[in-house]
Image (spheres, grey):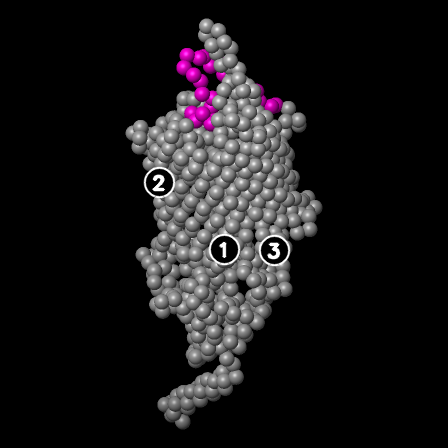
Amino acid sequence: MTFKQNLFSQFFLISVSSLMLVNTAVAETNQLSGLEIAQQVNARDEGASVSRNLTMEMIDRRGKKRVRETRGFRKYYGEEKRTMIFYLKPNNVRKTAFLTYDYPQADDDQWLYLPAMRKVRRISSSDRGDYFLGTDFTYEDIKKEGKVGIEDYTWKMIGEEIIDGHHSYIVEAIPINDKVARELGYGKVIYHIDSNIWMVRQTKSWDVRGNELKTINFHDIRQVQDIWTAHMLEVNNHKTGHNTRFLFSDIDYATGVADEIFTQQALRRGL
Amino acid sequence: MCFSTWASETGTESTFGNIEYSAMLETQWAYGVTKKSNQKFQFIYEPEINIELPNNQKFTMIGRLRGDISDKLEPNNPSQTEISPISRRLLMGDHAELALREFYYEATVGETYLTLGKQQIVWGQADGLKLLDVVNPQDFREFILDNFTRSRIPLWTVNTEIPIHDAVLQLIWIPDQTYHALPESNSLYAFTSPRLVPDVPPGINVNLHPVNKPNRFFADADYGARLMHFVGGWDLTLNYLYHYNDNPVLFRSLISGPQPTITITPRYKRSHLIGGTFSNTFGDFVLRGEVGYSTDRYFLAEHINDSGGVNKSDDFAYVFGLDWSGIENTFLSMQLFQSHLIHHKAEFVRSKVDTTLTSLIRRNFINDTVIAEVLWIHSTNDGDGLVRPKFSYEWQDNIKVWAGMDIFYGNQTGLFGQFSRNDRLIVGIEWGM
């Protein structure tokens, strides 16, 4: 066999393999609706609790960067999820803290501690489409942590593709009504969901007027204590040219988090 | 737990555990637009040291070095008679001072959380108006224009927080006999409203006695309790404070004769304050409020012959606030504050019902780097008030610049109107280190 023939054979084999993979995925896809894929994403194990460092980098269209260093905690109480974020740096936002109780069937309860006032402020949970403390993530994005709001959208599987070398389903999510769309700030979201590990690898969102709004990429996805974890999230806001990067480190699912972390007393006291 | 420590950054291993140093440097310039003169040209350096000790123990120290070239807010050396000796500032000439702002130790003993030392305790849900936020006294050198954290006077306090089922009981004991720092008569923001200072007819001398300040360590201490609970979506507290009211009562007597003289004897008087707070969300709205009942409050009387120039009454007061954030990046807040004197008499200078309204509109731009806001406080009784537009810009990660105006309006007899000639333009820069 000549070198060319050898190369052709290898190419043929690879192509056939790829086709078989895609066919397998298509066959599987036929059995999964968009809603089922979204449910798979939300069923993914994310640990009963986690603690981690989070560095937020916010870059404006001229390249000026602001950096926030935080420490975050999350814990499940049955279906209820509690999340706390403490700001550590820089000094002008240090001691700011954000606490949320996310209920499966009711509006969330959210509190923000503002060190300049030394007061815990209640925040309306319907502000979920507002941007979180200067980032390009909304409060809802922060709360969902890579999961999806199943009840907020109607789901439709519209295709599949290879993204970053991983087979992914493309799922379209349309808010169930105008009110929800306005609350979320999204008129449409396209999710690219890894079919093997049920992690969102990319989302593209459009605003309520149909203009392209944001792209969120989930990078450096690897297992930490057997749990698939994205170590970097990057948002490009197409409207403003502003970018936000979330960099996670020192992630610990195993040690557990004390209940006292998720209290208004802890908000005030800080770490 | 400490994630960024000065000690570790500099490679220093401290025997006390992690040591964290941070500081805030701020410069402010205020220009009185009516009097066409500087009100202040001030710099503030506020260092903070946090030391983390074993077993979740923490130690915090916050200092403040403040200088003011203008020296109009507290001309010369203020007497600080309202402040206990251990809490006083160190005055360095007419233009600079050094203060130990906060100095406290935190520890958990069993399930009880202890905070011991000089600290601020903030109660209440109201913004800009104080009903239950009276645990710490306030420095009025700039009336209410300085931010509350900076103008609140920290006190030496024993502060315990005890979990009781799902609630938390806070118990406080304050042996520090420090009260409101009131501006002296030669200062820019000295009180002149007849609601606060007695009116002295022309031709009558005034003999102002030194303030009769409580000084018994145990017997004159303040103490209080707050029960905090989150239930059914409501944040609720019950509050009780047995304290000396931070405003001295100005008892007056008239000595007749060829040279009539009014003698004023300031004295601090005890009061029980019982009340509570609430807050909850309803869609885009946050409803919050405070209710308080104070016993034995003293108010100035019209005539000097009326019970030593003062009258006593209980006071029932409340604040209802409604915040709305239905528009992205926009925050609207309205508050109604009312105080009802239960034993009001005709000779009171103050009305039976005192009503103040506030509204705040704030909008964030460019990923929260630019914030524009207007705060409006209006007294319906006197028809006076204060408007505070402000614009701030986060120039760098740790540098913020801002500009604003403080505009008083109304009759000079009112709480706000008394400063109607003190309208000012103010600019500042804040650097976090």
Name the residue nearer the viewer: B433 or A139.
A139
Q: CA distance from mark 2 to mark 1?
A: 28 Å
Question: Residue A218 vs residue B124: left or right?
Answer: left
Which residue does the numbered mark 2 point to in the structure image? B404
- Between disc 3 and disc 2, the foreground one is 3
Residue found at the very far bottom of the displayed protein: A1
Region in magenta: B190-215
- Image point 54% across, 74% down: which residue? A40
Chain identity of mark 2? B
Which residue does the numbered mark 1 point to in the structure image? A124
Dominant secondary structure, magenta: loop
Label 1 CA crowd tier, 10 Å (few <14, some 14–19, many 20+): many
Name the residue nearer the viewer: A246 or B342.
B342
Does residue B207 show up magenta in the picture? Answer: yes
Q: Position of residue A104 (x, y in %)?
A: 57, 65
Instruction: Name the residue type under label 3.
Output: Gly
